[in-house]
Structure formats: C-alpha cells, structure tokens
Image: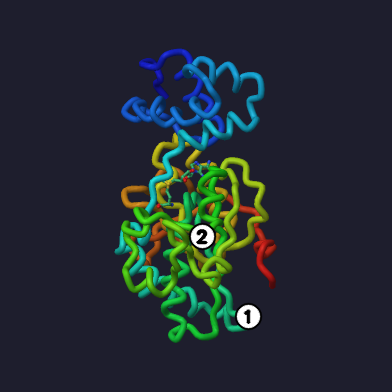
C-alpha cells in the first residue's frame, strides 16, 4: 500500500476505507476521494476533509464513518453486466446445477449469493433471467441473497426502484416492459422479482448475515482493489458457503489463482470456479444451515 501522495486527512480516510472494507485506494483512484466525499462534507456543513476526519475520530464506527465509507466505495454496476456471463449462467450453469441429484427432493431450490451486490442490478438480472425461463424450470425456485457493505446501496436495491439512466444500462426493453412499472420519474421492479431477493448490508470481512450454503456465488468486480491477504480471507469465506458442487463466478480479469485453495478452476465450466474437493486443501467447516431469510 502506498499513500505517499496523500495529505494527512486523505491518508487517514484511505486507511479507514481499507480497514473497514479491505479496499486499498490506489493513487490512480485518489481523484475519487475529494469528489466522492463532497456530498458528505456539504450535508454535514464541514469546510474540508480535515473537519470530516476530526469528526470521524470522535466516533469511528458511527453514522459519519459509515457515510464516508459508503461514499468512497466503488458502486459501479449495470444490468446484465458482461452479457456473456449471463448467457453462460442461463445456458450452461443453471441447467448443470439443476441436474445435480441432490436436488431430486422437494422443494427444488437453487440458492444464489451475490456478494458485493451494489444497488442490485446483478441480483435483479439473475431474477429476471430465471423468471423469463419459468417454463423451462417449472419445478424450481430461485432464492438470492444479495449483500453489500454499503447501506446506501442496499437501501436503494431493496427499494426495487431504478432511475431512467440505470434502466438504459443493460436492460432490454422487453424486460423493462415485462418487469417494471413507472414510479414517478423512476421505475419499480415487479413484486415477484423483489420477493426472490433478500438484500442485506453485510461486510465480507466480518459477515453477520445468516449465511448458508449456495449453489452459485457471484463475487464480481468486488475484490479488484483488495490486497492479497484480504482476498484470501474472502475467498475462504466464500468456499465455506459454497455447496459441494457449487460454482463461483468472478468479474472479468479477476482470478482466485494464488489467493486460495478453497476453489479450483472448473473443468466443466470455462471461466468459472468450483469448490476444491482436494483432501489436501484446507478443511473448511461446512455450513449446513439454510439462509435464514427465506421460508424452508
Ligand atoms: C464495483 S461494485 C460491483 C457490483 C456488482 N457485483 C457488479 O459486478 O456489477 C463492488 C461492490 O462491492 C462492495 N464492497 C466493497 N467492499 C466490500 C466488503 N468488504 N463487503 C461487502 N461488500 C463490499 C461495494 O460496496 C460495491 O457495491
């Protein structure tokens, strides 16, 4: 980590961000710091970063620290981000996961975890993909746990509301007409989709949500700015909550290589990872509880 070009208050904010989220603010992302925090400064009547840092120091886990963290994390997301991945999920991964004999009993439920879900576009894309194919999978239901450290992002996701600008980023007109209704100058997702997703504020470094076992885990574009030891910590967490034949998907350009023994590159699904079955690998205590928020 190198924060040498930072002023002392900037350095403190970068350190706070890293210790709360795991994210390192690299120098090329420094420009974000002042612009991102401007609304927090304005709302609280602070003249500059120094005043903000002094106020956070009084209550390091308080509302202000959370607001500053929320403002600094990168929440960039869009519907069906990287369309190839969603095609793969639809044509390859879901059919393969559903063929697993462990699902022969009832109810036939696939559990998905969107780790680092931002404002919900990824989880809603999955819900739409599934709901658009109901006839292909009539006996199935999809339960999605979607977590993010940012309270602001999760609140937005949970509202099911999307701005006009956001629907223009990756949402097909057919999906818009089928699954959304106008709500003022925004759009609102159909209740049936909203009910498929449990949005929760949670930190991957110290999770509190009742995590269970997931058939498909998406942790895309979350760990890009995490140092290696934090990546390891989070990949190990994901491995503990991945079902025996479960799949992990990362963002384009992200890899587990060198960061965990909990997953290996999938031999069946190019670009995906599966939980390591190797007895030589670290032994992960298995999670057997189903995710709490959904009915059994
Ligand atoms: C760039 S967005 C990616 C959103 C979505 N997965 C996608 O690919 O479109 C990264 C998200 O990870 C979240 N995040 C960062 N650190 C986190 C942590 N320690 N625990 C949980 N979420 C975190 C951020 O708040 C942000 O919303």
Q: Earlier in the sequence, mark 1 or mark 2?
A: 1
Vertical position of residue 131 compared to residue 83: above or below: below
Asked if residue 192 lies left or right of residue 254, the reply is right
**Residue 248 visible in the displayed image:** no
* In-front residue for pair 144/120: 120
Local crowd size for mark 1, using a 10 Å CA cut-off: few (<14), some (14–19), many (≥20):
few
Residue drawn 52% across and 51% down?
A: 156
Residue drawn 57% across and 60% down?
A: 145
Q: Which residue is mark 1?
A: 107
Instruction: Give the x, y percent position of residue 192.
Output: 54, 72
Instruction: Give the x, y percent position of residue 72.
Output: 46, 33
* In-front residue for pair 31/245: 31
Q: Is mark 2 within 8 Å of ligand 1?
A: no
* In-front residue for pair 257/80: 80
**Residue 134 visible in the displayed image:** yes
Vertical position of residue 64 compared to residue 99: above or below: above
Residue 160, numbered circle:
2
């Amino acid at each position: 980590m190198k924060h040498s070009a930072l002023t002392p208050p900037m350095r403190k904010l970068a350190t706070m961000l890293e210790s709360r989220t795991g994210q390192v603010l690299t120098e090329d992302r420094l420009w974000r710091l002042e612009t991102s925090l401007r609304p927090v400064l304005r709302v609280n009547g602070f003249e500059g970063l120094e005043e903000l840092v002094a106020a956070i120091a009084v209550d390091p886990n308080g509302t202000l620290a959370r607001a500053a963290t929320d403002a600094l994390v990168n929440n960039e997301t869009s519907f069906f981000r990287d369309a190839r991945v969603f095609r793969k999920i639809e044509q390859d991964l879901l059919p393969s996961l559903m063929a697993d004999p462990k699902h022969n009993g009832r109810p036939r439920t696939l559990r998905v975890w969107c780790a680092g879900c931002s404002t919900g576009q990824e989880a809603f894309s999955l819900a739409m993909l599934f709901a658009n194919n109901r006839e292909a999978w009539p006996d199935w239901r999809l339960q999605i746990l979607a977590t993010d450290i940012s309270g602001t992002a999760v609140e937005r996701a949970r509202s099911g509301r999307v701005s006009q600008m956001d629907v223009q980023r990756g949402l097909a007109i057919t999906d818009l007409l089928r699954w959304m209704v106008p709500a003022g100058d925004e759009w609102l997702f159909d209740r049936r989709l909203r009910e498929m997703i449990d949005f929760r504020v949670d930190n991957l470094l110290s999770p509190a949500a009742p995590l269970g076992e997931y058939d498909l885990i998406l942790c895309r574009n979350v760990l890009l700015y995490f140092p290696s030891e934090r990546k390891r910590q989070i990949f190990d967490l994901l491995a503990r909550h991945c079902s025996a034949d479960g799949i992990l998907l990362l963002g384009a350009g992200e890899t587990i290589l060198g960061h965990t023994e909990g997953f290996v590159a999938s031999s069946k699904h190019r670009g995906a990872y599966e939980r390591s079955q190797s007895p030589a690998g670290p032994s992960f205590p298995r999670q057997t509880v189903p995710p709490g928020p959904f009915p059994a």
